[in-house]
Image (tube, grey):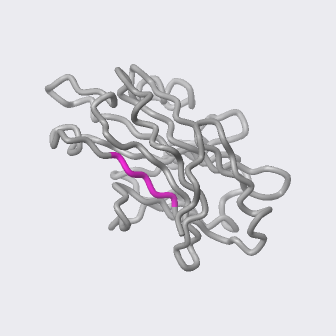
Amino acid sequence: MPAAPMKRGSNAALTREIPNLHGVVIGVALVSSEPVLNDNLVVATLLCDDDHRVLSDEHMVFFNQLSEPTMSVAQVTQAAGGDLEQIEVDLDDVPAGVHRIVVVAYLNEGMGHRRTFGQLRTARIRVLNLDGGAELVSSENLAPALSQETGLILGELYRHEGGWKFKVVGQGYPDGITGIAADHGIGL
């Protein structure tokens, strides 16, 4: 049974509610009626310290780097269940220096046409239990609140009191990956 949709800014105490939770799959669904937009959507996962700064270039997981060095966070090569992308996280093996695992989406800046996330029909993030695939949390559809953005923080897993929580963020960026990179200490 799917989880009730969480609103922007809501969080869930994953490991407090499921003490034996050792791994999750984060699924991202982004849908537009425009094929050009769909073909230029990029999902990336940023492994950050407590100040929201990416630990290093090796701590960004995306189509060109499918895992971080310890392989505790890896992009799934074939997403399932209607997700555009899926990220597998082994919660027990995430390096101690990683406090936040931030999932973002952006439009490839090489596009010749002016496209924005305002053209999305669907923008959702969800968390599944790695063991069995049960949906634990799912966001509301974030697309209706988007207009001129070309970058978006969908959600984040973060450490809290010895466990893990998940937060639906839904923060858009009109300057795409450039704005996301600036806020997370990534040099482009």
- Magenta: main secondary structure equals strand
Q: Relative to 109, does residue 61 appear above or below in the rendering?
A: below
In the rendered image, the quadrant that contains the N terminus is bottom right
| Nearest to the observer: residue 122 or residue 24 | 122
| Residue 71 visible | no
| Nearest to the observer: residue 109 or residue 171 | 171
Residue 118 forms part of the magenta stretch: no
Residue 28 forms part of the magenta stretch: yes
Give me the residue at 79% from left, 50% from top: 160
Q: Position of residue 95 (x, y in %)?
A: 68, 58
| Nearest to the observer: residue 47 or residue 148 | 148
Q: Quadrant of residue 35?
A: top left
Give me the residue at 49% from left, 48% from top: 45
Q: Relative to 20, does residue 57 appear above or below in the rendering?
A: above
Q: Position of residue 181 (x, y in %)?
A: 48, 29
Give me the residue at 80% from left, 62% from top: 16
Q: Position of residue 55 (x, y in %)?
A: 61, 42
Query: Which residue extends farthest bottom?
Result: 132
| Residue 145 visible | yes
Q: Which residues are magenta?
A: 26-30
Q: Position of residue 5 (x, y in %)?
A: 55, 50
Give me the residue at 58% from left, 55% from top: 4
Q: How many marks?
A: 0
In the rendered image, the quadrant that contains the C terminus is top left
Query: Which residue extends farthest right?
Result: 161
Instruction: Say left or right for 154 vs 39.
Output: right
